[in-house]
Amino acid sequence: MTFTTTAIPAVVPPTVTTFAATSVTHNSATLNGTIAAGDETITAQGFKYKTTAASTWTTVAATGTTITSTLNSLAAETEYQFKAFATTASGTVEGAVMTFTTTAAPIVAPTVATLAATSVTHNSATLNGTITAGSETITAQGFMYKATAAADWTNVSATGTTLAATVNGLTPETEYQFKAFATTASGTVEGAVMTFTTLATPIVAPSVATLPATGVTHEVATLNGTVTTGSEAISAQGFMYKATAAADWTTVAATGETMSATINGLTAETAYEYKAFATTASGTVEG
């Protein structure tokens, strides 16, 4: 009798399925799939991916029967293709090609901090702050300031990441508000509002100079001097004089910035002392 052997049975390949991508962001995505082994040992498995516009695939390994792989450093707003695969001695089996599109890159706003004002005087102050850029170009930056009682803000530009701006022409003894700001295409980010109060106007005393006496005779002399006004009104000015040996001064008025006063009835052959003076609300300045 005879018999005939059957044909060599066909090799059962692995079953590879590609599933939809998950956790898709502007620069990452998780690829998913399943692999069921066939008759042969699987020597490599995972995913192949590329941008849809590209021609070359990139391979990433993944283990198990339910496989996943997270891709990073992807381009924002870009369509990608991917497919699961498994390789045996007989070749590579690939799952269906699927696609996903990364999202737009999130907008990161600049970080703006307002710092305390420095160098505050009766009419000026230096505003301070810091700015850290976000994901968009900063098109304007600096400070907004106003008197606390005012409604409208005034803008002043300042450059750099550590920024400062000196504002002048302020009103003495007045509280001001200010805040740092940075503007991008998405809008303006403002730092916290801070305050400072300008100082009182400093008092500048008049300048008084006593000049040599002229026209000196046995009983007459002309006293001379100059007075330059300070920040306060002068309420009295002129000269004080006395015999050097005397204790009390006599006052004689004189007007103008360059002033003189002629005194009579002096004692012959006697030394006299004199000095120019100017009086304001704050007191008397003497030459």
Image (cartoon, helix red, strand yellow):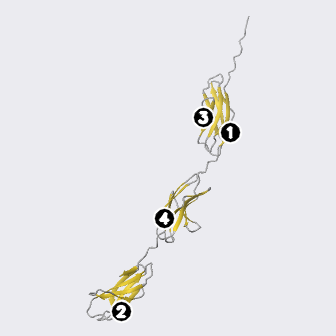
Under mark 3, the amino acid is Val
Residue 56 appearing in the image: no
Distance of label 3 from label 2 (alpha carbons): 109 Å
Q: Are marks 3 and 1 in contact (CB under 8 Å)?
A: no
Residue nearer the viewer, 29 or 245: 245
Name, please, the residue furthest toward the right: 1
Residue 50 appearing in the image: yes
Q: Residue at x 52, y 66 (%)?
A: 176
Name, please, the residue furthest toward the front: 248
| 3 or 2: mark nearer the eye | 2
Q: Residue 221: x and y, percent?
A: 32, 92
Callout 4: helix, strand or loop?
strand
Q: Residue at x 51, y 64 (%)?
A: 195
Under mark 2, the amino acid is Thr
Q: How many C-alpha atoms fall within 10 Å of the one at disc 2: few (<14), some, or many (≥20)?
A: some
Residue nearer the viewer, 105 or 257: 257
Quarter of the image with the N terminus in it: top right
Q: Are marks 4 and 1 in contact (CB under 8 Å)?
A: no
Q: Residue 224: x and y, percent?
A: 36, 87
Q: Which of the marked residues, 3 or 1, is nearer the chain's N terminus?
A: 3
- Quickly name the residue at label 2: 262
- Quickly name the residue at label 3: 60
Under mark 1, the amino acid is Thr
Distance of label 4 from label 3 (alpha carbons): 57 Å
Q: Quadrant of residue 23?
A: top right
Under mark 4, the amino acid is Thr
Q: Quadrant of residue 74?
A: top right
Left or right: where does residue 205 sit relative to residue 270? Answer: right
- Vertical side of 111 occupied by 218: above or below: below
Q: How many C-alpha atoms fall within 10 Å of the one at disc 4: few (<14), some, or many (≥20)?
A: some
Callout 2: helix, strand or loop?
strand
Which label sits on residue 99? 1
